[in-house]
Amino acid sequence: MRHAFLLTLLLSLSAAAETDLEKGAKLLHARKFDEARETYERILSAEPSNVEAHVRLCRLYAEQLDEIDKAIEHGEAAIRIAPSDASAHFALGEAYGLKAADVGVFSAFSQAKKCKAQFEIAVAKEPKNLEARFGLFQFFLQAPGIVGGGLREARTVADETLRIDEATGRRMRGAIFRKEKNLAAAEVEVKKALVLAPNDPDAHSAMASTLLQQNKPDEALAEFRKAFELDAGDPGRHLGIASALLQKGAVDEAIATYRSAIAMDSRFVPAFFRLAEALEKKGDKDGAAKSYRQCLALRPKSSFARNAEKRLKKMGA
């Protein structure tokens, strides 16, 4: 009888945790980040070894709440509990990558190497995890060689991915060609990706970026807007739209677009920084200074904050 009671209790606790995980996911989708954090922390207070809650808190702190050290704490906790969990390694790698962008040069090298190591482990643990693969690919594409970046390594990941998911692999190849300024080849690859995955917002954004580099803002704008239509919950989609509008010379529309991104997420520092740049370009010194200061207030240790501080000094604001 006692065993039956314990089994019932454990099952009820498990169901409650599952319900809270689902609730947290819905809150994230609604961009209610503080409520989502409280939900996941409530799970951990009852079940400290819940790996999924640690992983989600890691990503939430890193991607939305800009508390990188807390993100790393949860990522490391998840790996201690489940060292074979690919999603935990990817989340921790992402946190290390963001940390690298927010610290000084020497510390950044250390964090970047940790980022690479975690992405590599995630891909090794789960080779078909496309998110982990794309994270590792972007690291190789963007990071300097001194910390392990390089186009040769990026090509290797792209070629491997092509055999797992052709659309994603084509998109990766397109990004490599854009990096090399071979825009015609990039366009060919991304067109193939779009044929394979016509409803993939990232593929449309990749095509838009390719067109933008070819100084085709009208075509790029249509692709960025299609990406937003397919993924309207991501304020980052507005940044692409605004970049195309700026290339067209539509500064006022771009400013309105940046403000739309901020209306979706009042902590979205990239939008504040780009808004400040656009306002400065327009000659609105006070408005630009206010937006630059928001970058300093929201993420004082970030590269955005450092660049905002430089702009404020140059403006004499």
Image (cartoon, rainbow, N blue to C red):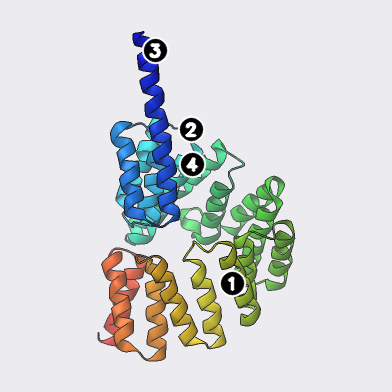
The residue under label 4 is which amino acid type? Ser
- Residue 188, image x, y percentages: 74, 67
- Residue 189, image x, y percentages: 71, 63
Give me the disc on residue 87: 4
Placement of 59 over or under 315, stated as above or below: above
Placement of 76 over or under 192, stated as above or below: above
Q: Nearer the viewer, mark 3 or mark 1?
A: 3
Q: Which residue is mark 3?
A: 4
Residue 164 placement: quadrant: top right
Q: Is residue 142 visible?
A: yes
Identify the residue at image location x=66%, y=66%.
177
Identify the residue at image location x=68%, y=48%.
165
Q: Nearer the viewer, mark 4 or mark 2?
A: 4
The residue under label 1 is which amino acid type? Arg
Q: Which residue is mark 2?
A: 84
The crowding category of the residue bearing disc 1, from other C-alpha atoms within 10 Å (few below 14, some 14 to 19, many at least 20), is many
Give how far apart the Cα atoms at labels 4 and 2 are: 9 Å
Quarter placement of the N terminus: top left
Placement of 163 over or under 312, stated as above or below: above
Give how far apart the Cα atoms at labels 1 and 4 are: 30 Å
Q: Is residue 215 visible?
A: no
